[in-house]
Amino acid sequence: MKITLDGIGDITCDEGKTILELCRERGIDIPTLCVFEGLKPEARCRLCIVELDGKLVTACSTYPRDGCSIVTNSERVRKARLMNAELLMPKHVNACSIDAKGESDPLCKLIYDLGLTRIRFEPIKKYAQDLSESVLRDDNKCINCGKCIRACSEIMAVHAIDFAQRGHDEHVSPYCGHRLHDVACIKCGQCIAACPVGAIYEREHLFEVLKVLNDKNKHVIVQTAPSVRAALGEEFGMPAGSLVTGKMVAALRKCGFDRVFDTDLGADMTIIEEASEFLHRLEKGGPFPMITTCCPAWIKFMEHFEHGLIPNMSSCKSPHEMLGILAKTYYAETSGLKKKNVVVVSVMPCTAKKFESTRPELKSEVDYVLTTREAAKLIRHFGIDFTSLPDEEFDSPLGISTGAGVIFGATGGVMEAALRTAYEFATGESLGRKLEFEKTRGLDGIKEGSVAINGKEIRFAVAHGGANIRKLIESKDEYHFIEMMACPGGCIGGGGQPWPTTKEVLGKRMDAIYRADRCLPLRKSHENPAVKAIYSEFLGKPLGKKSEELLHTRYFKRDMF
Amino acid sequence: MQILRKTDLEAFRKARELGPAGVISLLKEKGLSGRGGAAFPVWKKWEYTLNAQADEKFVLCNADEGEPGTFKDKFIIKNNPETLIEGILIAAQVIGATRAFIYLRGEYEHLRRGLERVIDSILKESKSEVEINIVVGAGAYVCGEETAIIKSIEGFRGQPYFKPPYPPVEGLWGKPTIVNNVETLANVPQAILFDDWIEDLRLFSLSGNVTKPGIYELTEGTNLSELIALGKPKNRIKAVYFGCFGGCMPYAAMELSPEKVCVKNCAIGSYSIIAVDEKQSILDVALSVAEFYAHESCGKCTPCREGTIRIWELLEKIKKKKATNDDIDTLKDLAEQIRETSLCGLGQTATTHVLTALAHFRNEFVKEA
Amino acid sequence: MMDEHDVLLLPLLRKAQKKHGYLSEESLKKISRKTGVPISRVYGVATFYSMLHTEKQGENVIEVCSSPSCCVNGSLDLVRFLEKELKVKTGKTTKDRKFSLCKTSCIGCCDHPPAMLLNGRPFTDLTKEKLRALLKKCGKKKRR
């Protein structure tokens, strides 16, 4: 197909691509607000206006015909984009200066690029903010692009929010105007990741953390999830896929944390407990499938919509919760610290973990959860030049981890880590070089495979993203072991990660995770000497009385609404 | 009136004999065009739907007559519902649909029972196996748009989606769907059965400042003066509105045809004429129309959602004598952009009224400013 | 749970509203459970349409047409008249909860203006006298 683009004729291009796709391929920048990668366009925002054969159309939803002429930057186009942007600005109150999306807010960027700022309209409505302990909404900033709703329904299949009312009264809302906190929201934060203008953002705990950092009586520990080291660099201009473990540790130490521990050790602990749990079920004959529980958003999903699965769930706490409690018991005791002076801060890619640590039955010893973005803010607050930091190591004793621990960050990682240990525990044989389970890896929505353990075929499956979770549940009985992660890509795609999380960025972060695994000297959780020490000195044995008391939890039925 | 002629299922039987291709060819010959405002040739739409490959197809009768000043479909439903139902059955027969829907606007709910009785009796008599469901709307002008009706029936907010895909290819639940107006479908049996069926008779809905408002069946191209005379106004008519969406123009003796009306930057649509006499203020009418659009905008796309209420705001400012010349410029600018960049026909025609009113009756706006 | 093609949500909502006068949270939950449509969408659909209400309405709902054909025939004067008679602002419900008053878009009665819907039924060729009589019939005592 041949088209004319911005005056240049005879351009050959593929059919079946929208004007937006064709322009992006050629490096032509067209502003968009409502385009959602991987989903069909809705053409709501009307910012991506271009001229097609003299008519104004939206680039995201229009396919050029053979022989047509497209103009992406004429006075007519600029005028149209500017008017639509101007109409949106009164709805984006108090933007820019404290904009949660900062420089990546495309609406503000468009106004800036177009160079003309004239807002002739006043805001009409004042909405009350929707506040909770993890995900906050401010309808006064919402520009009705609908991406949060699409994330919540099409990607996550949770449907906590939708548009309500009509016309200029249209706004995003949980049913009957309830707070997000009071409805079946799994706190995954994918809505936060989707929102281009920061009308949805996480409840920050930075002031609280700063307070304890400044309190001389407090021994403040910070622990970092596997996914954080694969993404934190992006907040400081480093390319996606940069593995910044050493710099991350150095930066946090410079912020004033007394100890920098590694959540990956918590992950190793989770594997020891969970693999033991799985083998115990194999002996007992069920219940199958056993389903992983590191993901608090998945747990909430299950509690609301699939609580019939409670008997299938592993009773293991999530890695950072395990580490948190070990920090305040094992570590505090062996270091002669009073528990009440120890503060544990978790840096997570996840907004659901903020909610998780408030669950009463969990008896969490994690005091504050910061997202990756918040950690970056903290580092910036201290004026630390992140990229020029030399690498530093985690602190002992809770800083040694294995490759099995780090791969928790990617979808399929928990399963792979568990299989590495379960196999060797059950068979007594070493996996040798064959410890990479390819079938668990990659960005396919549902992955499956099997491994022979003592002559028995163990079938496993992995799902990420709510829609895939629902799908896998339909065929769950075919499997012995299932890993569920709420966020697409697993934790590397978490609601607390740097923006934007595109498919390309996810792929790069995933590569970083598996690269980290390959570079570590120890790659199986049960080889971790620190973990061995914790059991021998403190816990006793996996699934033993103390382990049960500290490292396991339970789940509840929640209302589907 | 031609539209009130009874066809007694004769057209249905003739259509069955002619077969789908025969019916389409006959409709092409007769030149029946859509009466919902877009005037798309009926045979073409039906042919697209017939040729679309799918395991299920639907007929959807658009009875969501919501354009202010329009009540012709109500007239047909009350006075010759049989021909409408027969038209639906013929459409279903042509495309091979087993299910049809009539989307009846919520404000016409009192007509539902009568219509259901007619459906039952016709289905019985024709022995057709087509299932005809009446889905009653709930008050949304935007649901007169074909993709919005589809979303509404599917159980979503009645917001239009961009085309393509067009309903004949992908409509209700993704299946090929014919969406036709009541008057269009009512004319199908008439056109098929009667050799003397006249194509260019239209049902004019006349209302406003006339003592004899009503439905007048006249030829396309009838002079406006003739129509107004039939309405017997008490006072001098100074302007006519073509519904809300078609804009307004000063009263003039001229042909009421799409082309002639277009010259005045208006659109004739489905032939609704609202007569406004000299005692009325065009600004007040503009306010009424602007409020209508702000209330009826579905909210999906930025220019219509955010812009229609600003149009109303600006007109109120003019009414309160607080507007400046800049405000008038903003009004015009805004009206043009809403027209140019809205997603659907509602937004694209929401500001014709204000642009034509400013063009033809500027003194009523600027004087007040 | 219903098959996709049988989930005609709009009729279910209308039916529930007819029964209870408005769509309570409980009604919406019931419909969501029955149809499998997520409650956020049920609420979104319910609040989209002018004739569906998620808040309790008065015993009698008056919707006066305010579109051009009725407007040029004095319908807005009748709205102001009703506001005075009922001592209520447009868009609100009277204190005794007997009447809700609002303006509505064209109801297709342009041949008999001015017109209104009273509890969903059209009343046409309205005059102040006719309205007074209707209000009285609906149980409102005449203003002294």
Image (tube, coloured by chain):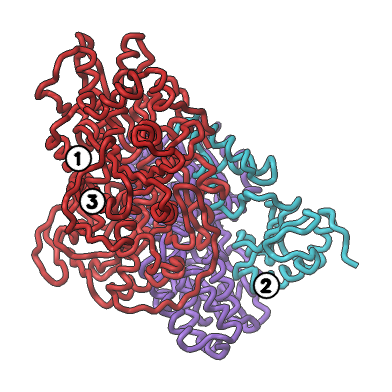
Chain colours: A red, B purple, C cyan
Residue A196 percent location from the top left of the image: 35, 58
Residue drawn at (48%, 49%) of the image: B157
Question: Is disc 2 placed on a helix, strand or loop?
Answer: loop
Locate the N terminus of chain B and report the quarter of the image it occupies: bottom right
Rate crowding at label 2 as few (under 14), some (14 to 19) or many (20 or more) other CA atoms within 10 Å. Answer: many
Upstream in sequence: badge 1 or badge 3: 3
Task: Find disc 3 in the rendering and name its residue.
Answer: A250
Residue A410 percent location from the top left of the image: 25, 37
Badge 2 amino acid: Asn
Task: Find disc 1 in the rendering and name its residue.
Answer: A513
Question: Is disc 1 placed on a helix, strand or loop?
Answer: helix
Badge 1 amino acid: Ile
Residue B228 percent location from the top left of the image: 58, 75
Tell if the residue under mark 1 belongs to the same chain as the one under mark 2.
no
Label 3: chain letter: A
Report if the CB atoms under discs 1 and 3 are less than 8 Å apart.
no
Res. A93 in view: yes
Q: Quadrant of residue A109?
A: bottom left
Task: Find disc 2 in the rendering and name its residue.
Answer: C73
Name the front one of labels 1 and 2: 1
**Label placed on residue B1:** none
Rate crowding at label 3 as few (under 14), some (14 to 19) or many (20 or more) other CA atoms within 10 Å. Answer: many
Q: Residue furthest front?
A: A336
Locate the C terminus of chain B and report the quarter of the image it occupies: bottom right
Label 1: chain letter: A
**Mark-to-mark CA distance, 1 and 2:** 73 Å
